[in-house]
Amino acid sequence: MTATVKGETRSAPAPDGPAAASRWSPRAGLLLLLRGRTAIVLVLLIVVFHTLSPHYLSDSNLLLMTKHVSINAILAIGVTFVILTGGIDLSVGSIAGLAGMICGGLLYEGLRLPGDTVYFSAVMVILIGILAGTGVGALNGLLITRLRVAPFIATLGMLYVARGFASLRSDGGTFPDLAGRPARGNTGFSIIGVNTWLGLPVAVWIMVVVAAAAILVTTRTPFGRRVYAVGGNERAAVLAGIRTGRIKTATYMISGACAALAGLLLTSELGAAYPDTATTYELNAIAAAVLGGTSLFGGRGTIAGTVMGAFVIGFLSDGLVLVGVSAFWQLVVKGSVIVLAVVMEQAQQRVQARMAAH
């Protein structure tokens, strides 16, 4: 509404109405806080741990924490694809350990054939490890889509199977020296887990590439839209002609590949392959995804939120270690974070539903 006064045109103030009331209501403020909860928690963690320990924000500690975050973030990105379809993957930690043992064995003792031993380059070993993880993910997907095994049961069983094969690979022992030898042409594995590039660990750059690719896939491709459709309403997705079985299997393959890559980064950083590598890391991955806003019921979530959640979990874990909290209490805190994240996600959905009804 406008009025003319002495040649000037002025806009009258808009009347108060339901739209304005809802825009500035306490519910809108609460919803804003819930949507930004991950960033708020991250800032609070940094402030609290910096107050408790002056070394928390030192350059060396920030680089170390970011490197740890990169491994958890890659794991969580793969898990996010699965959760978006309404599934769950409890086997990612074991897949990471299995991939590490496969690659560790190939680097340490090669592939033993009758009358000869074949050694692969570091690049080929890394590709073999990622393919192994992708294969285990495909097996998870087939169990769930073809044999109709519940995702929780299928991946829980694969957790034990993959960990068992990781131990069988070396009869429970370790592969201690993965540096390789120039004569064998298998040096360079340490680059991905130890070296830096432009001042940042190579693992961080790998995380950036994986996250960027995942964001592109989920937001700009038909496959990404189908992933959300399957998780949002699988029955409607079937009626729309989406092959839900293939989509689910593909997400488990992505999860397996990301888990294998994370396991290789961790193995490279340690400089040795252990059967128990990445034990309980599936908790970190699920916690990061849920804390970042991914709904355990499927259909809602973003890769960017998952990466932010991984920073929260990583900075929290390293901060607890730095201030001297015992490993047992760290597990308690991580489990509590998962429960709290789910509670807050449900609270956000209730607030949004009430505002929509209003």
Image (tube, rainbow, N blue to C red):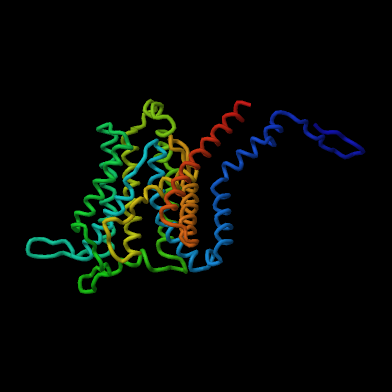
Q: Is residue 346 left or right of residue 185?
A: right
Q: Is residue 203 left or right of residue 143?
A: right
- The residue that appears at 57% across and 42% down in the rendered structure is 35
Q: Position of residue 204 (x, y in %)?
A: 43, 60
Q: How many marks?
A: 0
Most extreme residue toward the right, as rendered?
Answer: 6
Q: Is residue 126 above or below residue 75?
A: below
Q: Position of residue 31 (x, y in %)?
A: 60, 38
- The residue that appears at 30% across and 68% down in the rendered structure is 188
Most extreme residue toward the left, as rendered?
Answer: 115
- The residue that appears at 35% across and 46% down in the rendered structure is 255
- Which of these two is toward me, 70 or 124? 70
Most extreme residue toward the bottom, as rendered?
Answer: 183
Q: Position of residue 85 (x, y in %)?
A: 39, 37
Q: Is residue 316 above or below residue 255?
A: below
- Which of the 4 quarters of the picture holds residue 105? bottom left
Q: Position of residue 166 (x, y in %)?
A: 23, 53
Q: Is residue 345 above or below residue 173?
A: above
Q: Is residue 321 left or right of residue 358?
A: left
Q: Is residue 16 left or right of residue 162?
A: right
- The quadrant of the rendering that contains the N terminus is top right
- The quadrant of the rendering that contains the C terminus is top right
- The residue that appears at 90% across and 36% down in the rendered structure is 5
- Which of the 4 quarters of the picture holds residue 354? top right
Q: Is residue 15 above or below residue 114?
A: above
